[in-house]
Image (cartoon, rainbow, N blue to C red):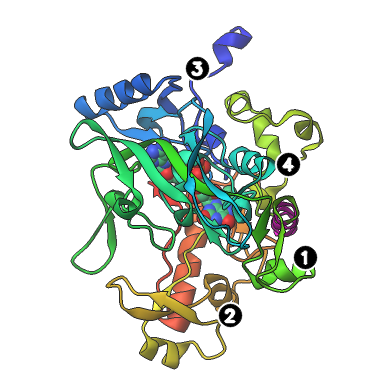
Amino acid sequence: MSQSENTPTTPSFADLTTIRIGGPIATFVEPTSEDDVIGIVREADASRIPLCVIGGGSNMLVSDDPFDGTVLRDARRGVTVSTAEATPSTAGAPASAVEVTAEAGANWDDFVAGCVASGFEGVEGLSGIPGTVGASVVQNIGAYGQEVATSVARVRVWDRELGRIAELGHDDLCFGYRSSSLKTTMYATNPDGGRTTTRWFPTPRYIVLSVTYRLVRSTQGTVGVGQLAKALGVDLGTRMDLAAIREAVLRIRAAKDMLEDLSRYANPWMSSSKDVGADLRNAQPNHNRWSCGSFFINPVVDSDHAAQYLDGAPQYPGALPDGSQGVKTSAAWLIDHAGFHRGFALDGSHASLSTVHTLALTNRGGASFGEVLGLAQTIVQGVWKTYRIRLVPEPVVVR
Ligand SMILES: Cc1cc2nc3c(=O)[nH]c(=O)nc-3n(C[C@H](O)[C@H](O)[C@H](O)COP(=O)(O)OP(=O)(O)OC[C@H]3O[C@@H](n4cnc5c(N)ncnc54)[C@H](O)[C@@H]3O)c2cc1C
């Protein structure tokens, strides 16, 4: 058999995801025009073929079984800038709003780097988050005092239900903590209160085609969270150069291995999706970064529960599912205090907690879907036993 006969013609999810797990894919397409994106989605939906729109694969844990459907990765990465009406600068200096529209396939961190370099304030705290512009609005990415919800003006989508293009404004998106009206179309609530998936899963009813962000023309941003202020040696709320904020965020993330492992772009299925350039030559595989980022969402409980079970745990105001005021706590704290420390692994498993971050479940090389799920389930059970809190996974888990 020749070399080319050995080479698969489609990637596996292990090739496309940051945790590098997942089975072979029947059909993989990378459309280069909006019409083609829509055409492929339409065809799959009309033929009832399972469809998965994937971005950077940084928030997905997929079964090792074959995926007998279509995986679409939007190859469009264009970014355009247009001015919007004047707005007062947060620093009090004259400034103006700027609208930046990015196509769904644009790499998120390349987009942030471009905004910082152009002097556009609003997304610098979200530096270093892996993935794409399209997915940024699905789960309302957030970190270091910022959420994408703050800067999203509108999203152009393909509505799979109604079969038409629509524009969703900020209010239509119903952003919440790691949530949006796009994400919620993938899930429904069981009668027992558990979560089940809808017919759209593992991709929302609305396919993101492009996102328009409203940013502020300013070379400075606000240091919005204590950890960042400490790293920069300034007070919370200080105005600083965007580039300094971005560098500090990247440094903090690197120390926790909460950046993606650039060695993934050596894979031919990944190399076209980001311009890694010279960085790739120095990129050594780092298994702490073979993850989906934080595996569990920080839970919100009612105040009675917090009083009974959360003595000593971090506590912040948070919204309960019914919108009422609750107490948000740290999933990492719960996991650690339930006895699962950094590096924890089940006997013989190739999956473990990161050695530098309690919330990251990692593939140490050759881990199976079942091994990661087994680790996740052990942690969920342990935290439930100790704190009567059921941790909810943040990534999209495709069984
Ligand atoms: C090391 C690491 C650190 C991370 N840190 C953070 C963090 O600090 N904060 C944070 O919020 N997240 C974080 N994440 C999670 C992840 O980076 C984000 O959720 C990101 O937005 C996922 O983007 P993606 O393109 O990789 O999405 P994917 O994983 O490819 O997809 C995720 C979901 O979005 C859907 N989707 C993708 N593209 C589209 C589209 N065009 N239209 C409709 N649906 C689409 C998919 O179908 C799927 O349901 C981290 C992940 C890693 C690996």
Of circles 4 and 1, the one toward us is 1
Closer to the N terminus: mark 2 or mark 1? 1
Segment colored magenta? 245-256
Amino acid type shown at disc 3: Thr
Residue 274 magenta-highlighted: no
Comes first in the chain, label 4 or label 1: 1
Image coords of residue 42 (percent x, y): 26, 25
Element at label 4:
loop
- Tell me which numbered mark, 1 or 3, is placed earlier along the sequence: 3
Location of mark 3 (residue): 9
Q: Is mark 3 within 8 Å of ligand 1?
A: no
Quadrant in the picture for the N terminus: top right
Please name whichever residue, 11 or 302, is drawn nearer the observer in this view of the structure: 302
Label annotation for residue 337: 2
Question: What x and y, as percent, mark residue 221?
Answer: 65, 58
Is the residue 48 above or below the residue 18 in the image?
above
Magenta stretch holds residue 250: yes
Could you tell me which residue is drawn at 26 percent across and 22 percent down?
Answer: 43
Label 1 with label 3: CB-CB less than 8 Å: no
Q: Are marks 3 and 4 in contact (CB under 8 Å)?
A: no
